[in-house]
Image: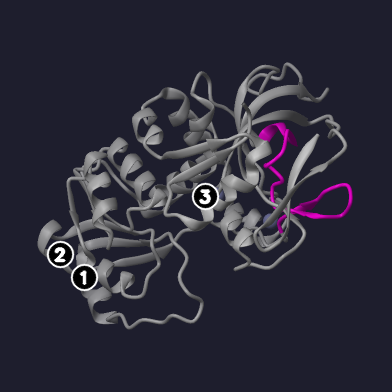
């Protein structure tokens, strides 16, 4: 089978890899589509230099083989099912995993191809093998939607830890792909209103078409949207945390979802946090219960229009170089690779 390997900045090749064998508790998945995320973009551009590497962690496909121990097991995927696949490895053994916080697993992630090349998912390939427990059935949902299982699970995690309840007033800073998924899922969860904040007027117009109750630049957010119960920061720009805190009503929560520069620090008022019972929390990655909910939401079709609007382009695996180039050089929502 073929697997895409990035060997240097802006250099990607398709390598031949032995067909993977399926262990007793694993499934073989023929990749139908794999989304290109920030990780793939950074590896391709050389912002993260780690070569050679086989990226691609947002995978969905069709189950083509099932291990003996899970074949016919109630609830486990069967041959022919469309699944969205969790390619992260969680050890179950470290302190975080034992506390039920497996998103923070302390064991290093990643595997290896047959020649030792480091794999961060290796989902830009004809097929992947994964534990059956990490493949979630997505029913009749289109493969493009199923391939959004990982980011949707991350946003489910974000809403869960943020404590979103129906009736909450919500603002989202950053109207890119992750911001738009927050918009879609917060609306689906019964938010009273979801406002979107961004510096790009183009993205704000698209967010409004997608159901944002109001849109604003960071400087106009409080005036436009008023005070909020929950503010999600999906774009970790300087000033974003301060904007989020200024938007929070009494008892409100700021959820830091997007990555910030490592050396950035900001001033916040401990007194304001105390007197107004504000919470500032970080969220990272996802956990199995988030995957289960994400797959169910995708399968149900309630997010179909939202997810359709976020598919920027889809390429065949042969054209992976072109796909990475598009994902890396242009502001896009999601570029998908595979199938066809
Ligand atoms: Zn991702
Ligand atoms: Zn662990």
How far across and how far down the image is residue 336, in percent? 55, 39
**Mark 1 or 3, nearer chain start:** 1
Q: Tell me the colour scheme of the image.
A: one colour
Q: Residue at x 68, y 19 (%)?
A: 78
Residue 22 horizontal side relative to residue 158, left or right? right
Within 10 angstroms of label 2, few (less than 14), some, or many (20 or more) residues? some
Which residue is labeled 3 in the image? Answer: 326
Look at the image and tell me whether residue 285 can be seen: no
Which secondary structure lies at badge 2?
Answer: helix
Q: For residue 79, which numbered disc appears in the image? A: none
Q: Residue at x 51, y 43 (%)?
A: 335
Q: For residue 246, which numbered disc appears in the image? A: 1
Which residues make up the magenta segment? Answer: 109-133
Q: Are marks 2 and 1 in contact (CB under 8 Å)?
A: yes
Which residue is labeled 2 in the image? Answer: 222
How far across and how far down the image is residue 300, in percent? 42, 23
How far across and how far down the image is residue 297, in percent? 43, 30
Residue 79 horizontal side relative to residue 296, left or right? right
How far across and how far down the image is residue 161, in percent? 42, 53
Which secondary structure lies at badge 3?
Answer: helix
Which secondary structure lies at badge 1?
Answer: helix
Residue 315 horizontal side relative to residue 203, left or right? right
Within 10 angstroms of label 1, few (less than 14), some, or many (20 or more) residues? some
Whether residue 297 is situated above or below residue 187 in the rendered picture: above
Give the Cα distance between marks 1 and 3.
36 Å
Quarter that holds the C terminus = top right
Give the Cα distance between marks 2 and 1.
7 Å
Whether residue 257 is situated above or below residue 82 in the rendered picture: below
Whether residue 297 is situated above or below residue 102 in the rendered picture: above
Give the Cα distance between marks 3 and 2.
35 Å
Q: Is residue 169 magenta?
A: no
């Amino acid at each position: 089978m073929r697997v895409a390997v990035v060997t240097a900045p802006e250099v990607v090749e398709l390598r031949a890899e032995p067909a993977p064998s399926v262990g007793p508790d694993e499934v073989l998945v023929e990749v139908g589509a794999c989304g290109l995320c920030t990780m793939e973009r950074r590896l391709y551009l050389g912002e993260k230099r780690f070569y050679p590497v086989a990226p691609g962690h947002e995978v969905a496909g069709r189950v083509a083989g099932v291990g003996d121990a899970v074949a016919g097991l109630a609830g486990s995927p069967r041959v022919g099912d469309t699944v969205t696949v969790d390619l992260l490895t969680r050890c179950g053994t470290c302190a975080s995993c034992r506390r039920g916080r497996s998103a923070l697993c302390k064991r290093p992630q990643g595997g290896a191809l047959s020649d030792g090349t480091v794999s961060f998912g290796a989902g830009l390939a004809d097929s992947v093998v994964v534990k059956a427990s990490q493949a979630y059935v997505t029913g009749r949902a289109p493969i493009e939607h199923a391939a959004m299982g990982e980011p949707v699970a991350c946003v489910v995690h974000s809403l869960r830890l943020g404590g979103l309840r129906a009736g909450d007033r919500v603002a989202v800073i950053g109207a890119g792909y992750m911001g738009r998924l927050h918009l879609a899922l917060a609306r689906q969860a019964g938010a009273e209103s979801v406002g979107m904040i961004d510096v790009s007027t183009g993205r704000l117009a698209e967010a409004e078409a997608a159901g944002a109750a109001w849109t604003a630049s960071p400087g106009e957010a409080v005036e436009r949207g008023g005070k909020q119960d929950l503010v999600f920061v999906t774009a970790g720009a300087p000033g974003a945390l301060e904007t989020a805190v200024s938007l929070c009503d009494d008892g409100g929560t700021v959820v830091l979802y997007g990555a910030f520069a490592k050396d950035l620090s900001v001033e916040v008022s401990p007194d304001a946090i105390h007197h107004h019972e504000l919470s500032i929390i970080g969220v990272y990655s996802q956990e199995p219960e988030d995957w289960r909910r994400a797959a169910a939401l995708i399968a149900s079709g309630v997010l179909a229009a939202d997810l359709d609007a976020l598919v920027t382009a889809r390429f065949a695996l042969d054209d992976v170089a072109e796909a990475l180039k598009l994902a890396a050089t242009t502001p896009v929502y999601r570029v998908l690779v595979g199938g066809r």
